[in-house]
Image: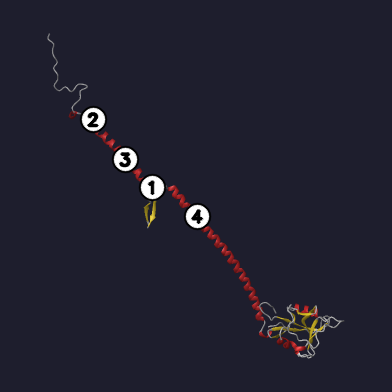
Amino acid sequence: MQDLEMPDYVNDGARRGDTLPADQEKPERRLFSLLFLIVGLLCVVQVLLNVSLRVAYNSSKTSACNSTQVGGRATAAPSQMVNCPETSNQRCNQLQERLNALTADKNLLENTNNVLVNKIKTLEEDIQRLQINISELSRCASSRRCPAGWLEINSRCYFLSTVGKPWEEGRRDCQSRNGDLVVIDSEQEQRAIYRLNGDVDLLFWIGLRGSNGNFIWVDGSELTDRWWQAGQPDHGGENKVEDCVEMYHRNPPLSSWNDAPCGGRRRWMCEREPCGLNVAC
């Protein structure tokens, strides 16, 4: 028998391992490759976008930290780059310094206010005292600038006792009346009190007393004007001590003083300031 040869089929496809022409590849495989390429491109684009956004974010943040305010607009400082934490610390330090300065000013104002309050209190107390003194002065009428029982002469107040006592007791009585024995420091005053009540025989103590041969007024002033009787002062001679001075109206006004023993009983004349701001009636 003759061997029969199997003829190749004309439409038989490529055998295993053979590659089809590009124009004969399956449509599904080409679509898959296209999709894979697109996905890859999208991933690359995504990465680039992420990197770009991060760079832009960091760049804007750094720009904000390094910007300076000029004319109401933020202007980048080209000289140096300063990080945000350091800038925040500097700002905090500036605010703390400002707070400390304001606190110091506040304390200074409080101290000044306390001083002024104390001065106001002192002034109020002074005003109250002045009001009291003015009230007392207002109670003293022009005809009563001196206390009751006193006589005003040349803006001074004089009091003549009605009884007789030793010089020291008479002075204590004057002091109890806010005055002292009369100090005669002018001829005008000497003549004014010479006949204070018109009594020709009037005899009274004045505020002049001897000490170691010298006569001193009770206010400590030295004796300048002298209106002694003739032959006076004689200090009482050898057997007497006459250190106190009296005024006697039987003699002329400018020669009416006489030294006498301080224990003798005489009337006395007191003198004091008129009613005023410093002296109550």
Estimate the x, y position of residue 182 in percent, counting from the top left: 74, 82
Residue 29 makes an appearance in the image: yes
Q: Are marks 4 and 3 in contact (CB under 8 Å)?
A: no
Crowding near the residue tagged with mark 1, few <14, some 14–19, many ≥20 C-alpha atoms within 10 Å: some
Crowding near the residue tagged with mark 3, few <14, some 14–19, many ≥20 C-alpha atoms within 10 Å: few
Estimate the x, y position of residue 193 in percent, counting from the top left: 74, 87
Disc nearer the start of the sequence (4/2): 2
Q: Which residue is mark 3?
A: 48
Mark identifier at residue 62: 1
Q: Secondary structure at mark 1?
A: helix
Q: Secondary structure at mark 3?
A: helix
Q: Which residue is mark 4?
A: 97
Q: Which residue is mark 2?
A: 29
Instruction: Please state which of the two labelled residues, at mark 3 or mark 1, is closer to the viewer.
Output: 1
Residues at marks 3 and 1, CA–CA distance in whole angstroms:
21 Å
Residues at marks 1 and 4, CA–CA distance in whole angstroms:
27 Å
Kindly identify the residue that appears in the image at 48 percent across and 54 percent down: 95
Up-down: is 105 above or below 278? above
Hey, what amino acid is under mark 3? Answer: Leu
Q: Are marks 2 and 3 in contact (CB under 8 Å)?
A: no
Kindly identify the residue that appears in the image at 56 percent across and 62 percent down: 110
